[in-house]
């Protein structure tokens, strides 16, 4: 039962952080348009590769899983 409590606690914190980012994130942090995200537009089409966003998400997810599975 202790593990279930930890899981709910961590999920609650995660949802709280996601809610705050969702509400206030666009004003202060343009997620998906970081320096290092590549975009190319031409008359034939558009290409977007979020390299910096992918690296940031990977670090955050790795940190979360490391804390969760400890």
Image (cartoon, rainbow, N blue to C red):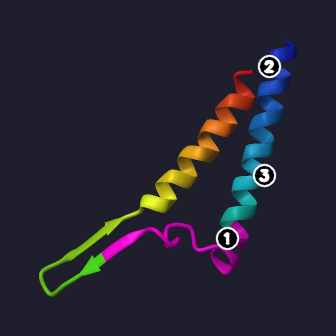
Q: Nearer the viewer, mark 2 or mark 1?
A: 1
Spatial separation of the CA atoms under disc 3 and disc 1: 13 Å
Q: In this rendering, which labeled residue sits more in front, label 3 or label 1?
A: 1
Q: Disc 2 to disc 3, how far (Cα)?
A: 18 Å
User: Which is nearer the eye, 28 or 55?
Assistant: 55
Residue at the disc numbered 2: 4
Q: Are marks 3 and 1 in contact (CB under 8 Å)?
A: no
Q: Secondary structure at mark 3?
A: helix
Q: Nearer the viewer, residue 26 or 57?
A: 57
Q: Residue at x 77, y 27 (%)?
A: 7
Number of residues whose C-alpha sits closer than 10 Å to that of mark 3, classed few (under 14), some (14–19) or many (20 or more): few
In three-dimensional space, the C-alpha distance between marks 2 and 1, rounded to whole angstroms, equals 30 Å
- Image: 62 above or below 27: above
Judge whether 70 appears above or below 51 on screen. Answer: above
Judge whether 22 appears above or below 45 on screen.
Answer: above
Horizontal and vertical percent position of residue 31: 56, 67
Magenta stretch containing residue 38, yes or no? yes
Q: State which region is magenta.
A: 23-39
Q: What secondary structure is marked by label 1? A: helix
Residue drawn at x 19%, y 84% as measured from the top left: 42
Question: Residue 16: which disc?
Answer: 3
* Residue 63 left/right relative to 7: left
Q: Is residue 1 left or right of residue 38?
A: right
Residue holding disc 1: 25
Mark positioned earlier in the residue sequence (2 or 3): 2
Marks 2 and 1 close (CB-CB < 8 Å): no
Quadrant in the picture for residue 17 = bottom right
Spot occupied by residue 37 in the image (x, y as percentages of width and height): 43, 68
Q: Residue at x 87, y 15 (%)?
A: 2
3 or 1: tag closer to the N-terminus: 3
């Amino acid at each position: 039962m202790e593990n279930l409590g930890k899981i709910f606690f961590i999920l609650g914190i995660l949802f709280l952080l996601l809610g705050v980012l969702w509400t206030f994130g666009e004003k202060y942090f343009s997620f998906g348009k970081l320096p290092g995200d590549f975009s190319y537009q031409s008359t034939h089409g558009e290409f977007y590769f979020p390299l910096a966003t992918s690296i940031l998400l990977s670090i955050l997810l790795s940190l979360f899983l490391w804390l969760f599975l400890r």
